[in-house]
Image (tube, rainbow, N blue to C red):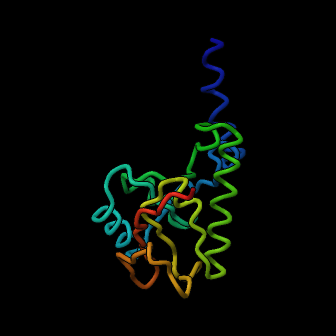
Amino acid sequence: PALTIPHTVHPLALALNSERVYGKSANSVQRYTRATLEVVDSINTNAHPGDVLLADETLLEPVLALTKCRVPLGYFSNFLVSHEDFATRQRAEAAFWKAWKQGEVVSAILREANVRYIVFDKRLEGIPSALPANLIEVFSNSEYALLRVKKLPSVP
């Protein structure tokens, strides 16, 4: 009987605060637009299973649900790595997207997490005016863009 308590408590905890349980907010039902499905199809065409893909918040769910890619920070991340590693990844990803919105590319997280692709909503994030030579656009539609990250040199 005591072993059934976690199974009983988990759905209640999830219902009360999904962000604490998953590490990110989770929607119960998600509908994807044609543009979303087009970028997912491009990811599946270009990326290999297990490639690390940095997705903005709007694309995290479809990437995890419809591709075989991994993300640096996703659902349950806060349970899969140490609290310190989770906090470090969280800060690095937030810094990346903050700089991205300001038209800059911070490549530290790309190198540290071995990111092969970046996918983002062009309407929310925009594209930095000058992409570094190591970022190559492989797909774009009216809403989303997918960039491939060429191997970054190691930092001494």
59 or 104, nearer to the observer: 104
Left or right position of 126 against 65? right
Check the image and report above or below for 39 versus 113: below
Snapshot quadrant of residue 48: bottom left
Snapshot quadrant of residue 12: top right
Residue 148 drawn at (x, y percent): 40, 69
Left or right position of 101 against 44? right
Q: Quadrant of the N terminus?
A: top right
Residue 28 drawn at (x, y percent): 55, 54
- Number of marks in picture: 0
Q: Residue furthest bottom?
A: 129
Q: Residue furthest front?
A: 156
92 or 5, nearer to the observer: 92
Snapshot quadrant of residue 145: bottom left
Q: Residue at x 64, y 78 (%)?
A: 101
Residue 11 drawn at (x, y percent): 62, 36
Check the image and report above or below for 84 versus 57: above
Residue 29 drawn at (x, y percent): 51, 58
Q: Residue at x 41, y 62 (%)?
A: 151
Q: Residue at x 34, y 73 (%)?
A: 38
Q: Residue furthest top?
A: 1
2 or 78, nearer to the observer: 78
